[in-house]
Amino acid sequence: MFNSEFIGHCFPTKILNVEEGKLKFFSQTIGETNPIYLDKGAAIDRGYRSILAPPTYSFSLTLEGESLKDKYEPIGLELGKLLHGAQSFEYFGEICAGDTVIIDAKIVDIFQKKGGALDFCIEEMVVKNVKRETLAVLTQTFIMRHK
């Protein structure tokens, strides 16, 4: 059961460099073929600072350096009962290879439905650049089922 005392809990801030090699690998893995996601010269020719990150790459950055178990067990997550509920993405700026991003994550809500048969935990992750301009807001919903 998710512990509702964690509503408002902020996780440690992450500061990450967007590495070109990892970004290219991600783009290739998702089947991206547009050269702005794979080739620095093509991206620069199209007006980007460097290789552009595909939209969902920001979510993969939020997973850097942690595991579900280590991050969420303290709030009551039981991996064997976990269901993926939802994910949403709002974009406000671009992320390119060579950028440094700052990620702040917090638990925004914890609640139950179906008479306690389902626990919900909603986390919001804000991705900013070094100027503290918001680049993306990512929201994910974890659901745990109880018998």
Image (cartoon, rainbow, N blue to C red):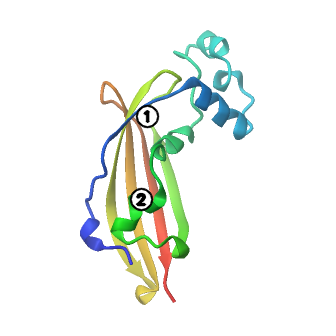
Residue in the picture at 30% in, 47% down: 12
Could you give the CA–CA distance between mark 1 and mark 2, rounded to whole angstroms?
Answer: 30 Å
Circle 2: residue type: Asp
Q: Is residue 45 above or below residue 147?
A: above
Q: Which residue is mark 2?
A: 70
Q: Nearer the viewer, residue 35 or 6?
A: 6
**Image quadrant in which the N terminus is located:** bottom left
Q: Is residue 54 above or below residue 121?
A: above
Instruction: Point out residue 4 in the picture as x, y percentages from the top left corner.
Output: 29, 72
Q: Are marks 1 and 2 in contact (CB under 8 Å)?
A: no
**Of helix, strand and loop, which one carries label 2?**
helix
Q: Is residue 68 above or below residue 56?
A: below
First of labels 1, 2 by sequence position: 2
What number is the disc on residue 113?
none
Instruction: Point out residue 69 in the picture as x, y percentages from the top left corner.
Output: 46, 62
Q: Quadrant of residue 41?
A: top right
Residue in the picture at 42% in, 70% down: 77
Instruction: Point out residue 140 in the picture as x, y percentages from the top left corner.
Output: 46, 57
Callout 1 environment at 10 Å: few (<14), some (14 to 19), or many (20+)? few
Callout 2 environment at 10 Å: few (<14), some (14 to 19), or many (20+)? few
**Of helix, strand and loop, which one carries label 1?**
loop
Q: Nearer the viewer, residue 136 or 58?
A: 58
Of tags 1 and 2, the one toward the viewer is 2
Circle 1: residue type: Phe
Q: Which residue is mark 1?
A: 92
Q: Is residue 98 left or right of residue 30?
A: left
Q: Is residue 142 above or below residue 134?
A: below
Residue in the picture at 47% in, 66% down: 142
Instruction: Point out residue 14 in the picture as x, y percentages from the top left corner.
Output: 36, 40
